[in-house]
Amino acid sequence: MAGRRGLRRDRFRRRGDQGQVAIEFVGMLPYILLVVVAVWECVLIGYAFSLAGNAADEAARVGAVDGVGACQEAAREHISAAWTMSTPSCYESGNLFKAEVTLNLPVLLPGLNLDIDIVGHGGSPNEEE
């Protein structure tokens, strides 16, 4: 008889832990998702800085040869429509042609923006045709 009670107790103990991992996972899921969203936001911020800097560099190269109008158009060509961009600033400064491209900081997706600006700067020596 003593052996049977031990089996019942062991069976009950094994059944009592069923689902524990699922409950712990459900409890941790919001934290896991929060970390994923935070990492994604950091990736978007880094990409926005890279995108703004590249567009400013390209715009400055074109502006050094063709002037302010071509500079602004080149900046717009290098930023897709999903990103919110203000009018690029293009100007000459001594022997350099400079461009500044300003993007709004995205929240989770490009197009959902905060009122925080990300500015890319670019410069190129003036060229004569």
Image (cartoon, helix red, strand yellow):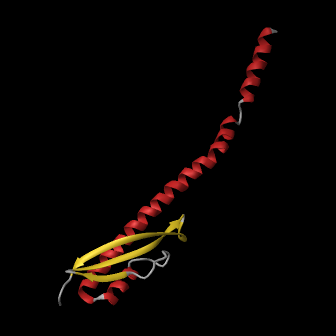
In front of the other: 22 or 87: 87
| Residue 37 x/y as whole percent | 55, 56
Instruction: Residue at 50% x, 59% y: name it.
Output: 41
| Residue 119 x/y as whole percent | 40, 71
Dividing the picture into quarters, in which one does residue 52 lie? bottom left
Residue found at the far top of this picture:
2
- Is 56 left, or right, of 115 in this rendering? left
| Residue 116 x/y as whole percent | 49, 68
Dividing the picture into quarters, in which one does residue 122 lie? bottom left
Asked if residue 62 can be seen in this view, the reply is no
- Is 4 left, or right, of 60 in this rendering? right
The quarter of the rendered structure image containing the N terminus is top right
The quarter of the rendered structure image containing the C terminus is bottom left
Instruction: Residue at 67% x, 44% y: name it.
Output: 26
Asked if residue 89 can be seen in this view, the reply is yes
Instruction: Residue at 32% x, 78% y: name it.
Output: 99
| Residue 66 x/y as whole percent | 26, 89
